[in-house]
Every structure is written in structure tokens, then in C-alpha cells.
Amino acid sequence: MDNVIEVLKDDKAVFFINEEIYSLTAVMKTAYIFIEKVYIYFDYEKEKLIRVEFTPKEIKDKDF
């Protein structure tokens, strides 16, 4: 696998990231930006290949 591959299915975004290019720490820090809008799941698909899964949170109307 190359660098980053994106698979969209069932309201999920799945990214496979090569850890030889991006460290787990860098991936986690970047994912933190999206923490209010999506649930984030990290796992190793295989050695040096990080699986990142984003699932949207249900957005509720905010009172302004």
C-alpha cells in the first residue's frame, strides 16, 4: 500500500496510513481536530499500517 488510502462506506471514512511516513502520534494529533464531530477508532491493519476510522456523531441543534 502506498501512503494514504480512503474508503468510504456506511457513513464511515476509513484511512490506511503508512507509519513509515506518518507516526502514530502525528496521526492521533491530527485526528484530535475532528473529535467533536466524529468518533475515531485506531488500529493496526498490519505492521506499520494504521487503520483510522471516522464515524460521524449525531449533531443536535444548538440553542443560540
Image (tube, rainbow, N blue to C red):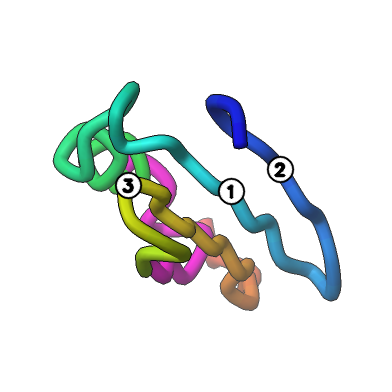
Q: CA distance from mark 2 to mark 3?
A: 17 Å
Q: Under tag 2, what secondary structure?
A: strand
Instruction: Give the residue pinned by disc 3.
Output: 48
Inter-mark Cα distance, 1 to 2:
5 Å
Let me know if residue 39 is in the magenta part. yes
Q: Is residue 44 above or below residue 28?
A: below
Disc 2: which residue: 6
The amino acid marked with disc number 3 is Lys
Q: Which label was assigned to residue 15? A: 1
Find out whether the residues at labels 3 and 1 contact each other: C-beta distance under 8 Å: no
Residue reaching furthest to the left: 25
**In this image, 51 relative to 2: left or right?**
left
Q: Is residue 7 above or below residue 53?
A: above
Q: Nearer the viewer, mark 2 or mark 3?
A: 3
Q: Earlier in the sequence, mark 2 or mark 3?
A: 2
Query: What is the CA distance from the residue labelled 3 to the residue labelled 1?
Result: 13 Å
Q: Camera-side residue: 23 or 9?
A: 23
Q: Which residues are magenta?
A: 33-42
Say which residue appears at 77% left-offset and 52% top-offset. Answer: 7
The answer to which of marks 3 and 1 sits earlier in the sequence is: 1
Q: Is residue 49 magenta?
A: no
Please identify the quarter of the rendering in which residue 42 is found: bottom left
Which residue is pictured at 71% across the width and 66% down the height? 12
Instruction: Check disc 1 and give the amino acid type.
Output: Phe
**Nearer to me, 57 or 44:** 44
Q: Residues within 10 Å of mark 2 (few under 14, many from 20)?
A: few
